[in-house]
Image: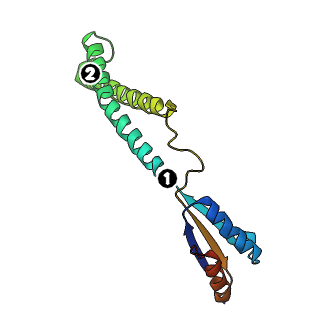
């Protein structure tokens, strides 16, 4: 008697819920069932867009930061000598890079004109059943059959 797991995917939450109800009515314990949804794909596109936006804004932000560091060094503000100038320019480059990327990301996250990451937008739902033996697994397979 080896434990077996049986799983089936459904196109929407309503059909998955019907399968769960059928399993519960057949006597399967609730703790043996699990339901998981797969995202709609909007999340992936949104995260890809945010990464591209952050990178594209970080580059000019870094350039502006480096220019500010160089201007400060020319004005005599900050450490002196070659090493001091390099440290100042690189430090301001990093600050500009981080600030520009951070604010670009924040602005995109604050834009609520689209609901990319909204709850309840699954395209498929998987119902899994942990069965104690093969007879129970066969019963679960019949109940989970989406063609019924």
The correct choice, above or below, for 44 with respect to 12 in the image is: above
Residue where numbered disc 1 is placed: 40
- Seen at 30% across and 22% down, the residue is 64
Residue 104 is labelled as none
**Spatial CA span between label 2 and label 1:** 50 Å
What x and y, as percent, mark residue 146? 58, 73
Q: Earlier in the sequence, mark 2 or mark 1?
A: 1
The correct choice, above or below, for 43 with respect to 85 in the image is: below
Front residue of this view, candidates 47 and 74 = 47
Q: Quadrant of the N terminus?
A: bottom right
What x and y, as percent, mark residue 32? 70, 72
- Seen at 52% across and 40% down, the residue is 115
The residue carrying pointer 1 sits among few (fewer than 14), some (14 to 19) or many (20 or more) residues within 10 Å by Cα, namely some
Residue where numbered disc 2 is placed: 85
Any part of residue 90 in sight: no
Which quadrant holds residue 8?
Answer: bottom right
What x and y, as percent, mark residue 9? 55, 68
């Amino acid at each position: 008697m080896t434990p077996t797991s049986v799983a089936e995917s459904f196109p929407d939450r309503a059909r998955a819920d019907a399968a769960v109800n059928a399993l519960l009515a057949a006597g399967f314990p609730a703790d043996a069932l699990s339901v998981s949804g797969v995202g709609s794909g909007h999340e992936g596109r949104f995260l890809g867009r945010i990464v591209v936006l952050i990178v594209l804004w970080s580059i000019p932000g870094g350039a502006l930061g480096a220019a500010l560091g160089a201007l400060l060094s020319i004005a005599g503000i900050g450490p002196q000598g070659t090493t001091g100038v390099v440290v100042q320019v690189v430090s301001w480059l990093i600050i500009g890079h981080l600030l520009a990327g951070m604010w670009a990301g924040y602005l995109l996250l604050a834009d609520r004109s689209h609901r990319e990451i909204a709850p309840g937008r699954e395209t498929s739902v998987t119902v899994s059943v942990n069965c104690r033996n093969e007879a129970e697994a066969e019963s679960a397979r019949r109940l989970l059959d989406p063609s019924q």
